[in-house]
Image (cartoon, helix red, strand yellow):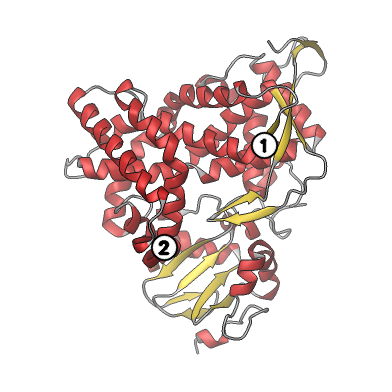
Amino acid sequence: MSATPSSIPEAPGAWPVLGHLPALIHDPLGFLSSAADHGDLLQLRLGPRTFYLATHPELVRTMLVSNATDFSRSKGAAGASRFIGPILVAVTGEAHRRQRRMMQPGFQREQLKHYVVGMTAAAREAADSWRPGQVVDVQKTASDLSLAVITKALFQSDLGAAAEAELRGTGHDILKVARLSAIAPKLYAVLPTAAKRNMGRTSAAIREAVTAYRADGRDHDDLLSMMLRAEDAEGRTMTDQEVHDEIMGLAVAGIGGPAALTCWIFHELAHNTVVEQRLHAELDTVLAGRLPTGADLVLLPYTQRLVKEALRKYPGWVGSRRTVRPVRLGGHEVPADVEIMYSSYALQRDARWYRDPERLDPDRWESKESTRDVPKGAWVPFALGTYKCIGDNFALMETAVAVAVIASRWRLRPVPGDVVRPVAKATHVFPNRLRMTAELRTFATPRDPVPGTAPDSATAASCD
């Protein structure tokens, strides 16, 4: 006889009437990380509504991959449609398949190399703005850098210069409005804000760029050119409105994750001398003070492992799916039209799946053998399956480039007395604050380096 939803245990800590809302508001990361102690599938009460929480990798993989047709996007994702339009990160079913097919060419590995010039330019712009001894607001810098990277990838022609400038000026406002529309759509509809007003000017600049690109007709090796060329299975191209909406969507999606990841990498480097020294040795050997190119990234394996390991330790904190029909999950029957949450943050810090999970260890990704025992559903920073993030490799490359450019020139040191802790913001995990002092560093000139490895000895040379 099948189990009923009532047999699914309820997570501890529920309050009368409010349920688990106080726990999720007060300490969402702690609450989700401890939930696995109480079962693989739990009930959550958020006010009058019942949600479910999957805490085991097998259940998460079932939701995202094995039985993906039984699930759709969450209601929260639909908020993006209210705010922007039916964009890739919000639609489901056939609409999603059509738009993903059209957007995919812009995120293939070979195409990504064309964006490295813009990525390095944005990172150099940030690094050039600092002075030795300056206290840097790393979170603001990283967020500005992520916004610069996505806008440069969108517009590599002067035809998009005005739109790029507008997006860089108002991108954070767009992100705030997007979050409000997803969390409180009724409030979003009536609340007059400066951020909403700024969007009108930005939207107009994007429309002008789309019109100019289409009239020009040339391929500028950027995301806008790709979107204008893209065709669906019937040979139809995207309309100007669809292109406009996807540009807005990419601006929103492209800011949070890479910015959070960059913050945590520099925080970790400041507290782990061995990792920092190995990173610097690799950068000095391969780059010797110059800016990285697309061809250099494959020569920076430790840098890339560092990015992946930071993403393991600091991924997004929550994701969810909605059942489209009654489903069987973890031996339980779950009804249709309910939300099932999962936490990348909790899964990827679980000692059952990752050895010494609180330690930042880039070498855990040195070979497939080193992570052979990690269940596939325990690695979900970009989700999995049908709705996996299309920009996963873009985000990893962007972060690797930012780390390579900045760490080649600067060390960032903690400000004494500052307490840094992780906090959940939207779907990402940021430091509560991250002020660091910039110290100009020198790069080392290795003697007879072994290709692809850190040098055994080095002499100091001027970074300039």
Q: Residue at x 59, y 31 (%)?
A: 400
Kind of element beneath mark 2:
helix
The answer to whether residue 50 shows anywhere in this view is: yes
Q: Nearer the viewer, mark 1 or mark 2?
A: 1
Camera-nearest residue between 301 and 176: 176
Residue 50 in the image, given as x and y percentages of width and height: 50, 79
Q: CA distance from mark 1 to mark 2?
A: 31 Å
Q: Identify the residue under disc 2.
A: 68
Camera-nearest residue between 343 and 157: 157
Residue 295 in the image, given as x and y percentages of width and height: 52, 20
Q: Residue at x 78, y 10 (%)?
A: 447
Compared across the picture, whether 461 is left or right of 291 comes to right
Q: Identify the amino acid type marked 1.
A: Leu
Camera-nearest residue between 117 and 111: 117
Relative to 297, residue 424 above or below: below
Compared across the picture, whether 226 is left or right of 345 comes to left
Residue 408 in the image, given as x and y percentages of width and height: 67, 21
For label 2, the crowd category at 10 Å Cα-Cα, with few meaning under 14, some 14 to 19 and many 20 or more, is some
Question: Across the whole image, how many numbered discs are drawn on residues?
Answer: 2
Which of the 4 quarters of the picture holds residue 22?
A: bottom right
Camera-nearest residue between 443 and 374: 443
Q: Residue at x 61, y 82 (%)?
A: 9
Kind of element beneath mark 1:
helix
The answer to whether marks 1 and 2 mark residues whose Cβ atoms lie closer than 8 Å is no
Residue 82 in the image, given as x and y percentages of width and height: 32, 59
Q: Residue furthest bottom?
A: 1
Q: Identify the residue under disc 1.
A: 306
Quadrant where the C terminus sits is top right
Q: Identify the amino acid type marked 2.
A: Ala
> Going from the N terminus, do you reach mark 1 or mark 2 first?
2
Compared across the picture, whether 185 is left or right of 283 comes to left
Compared across the picture, whether 322 is left or right of 433 comes to left
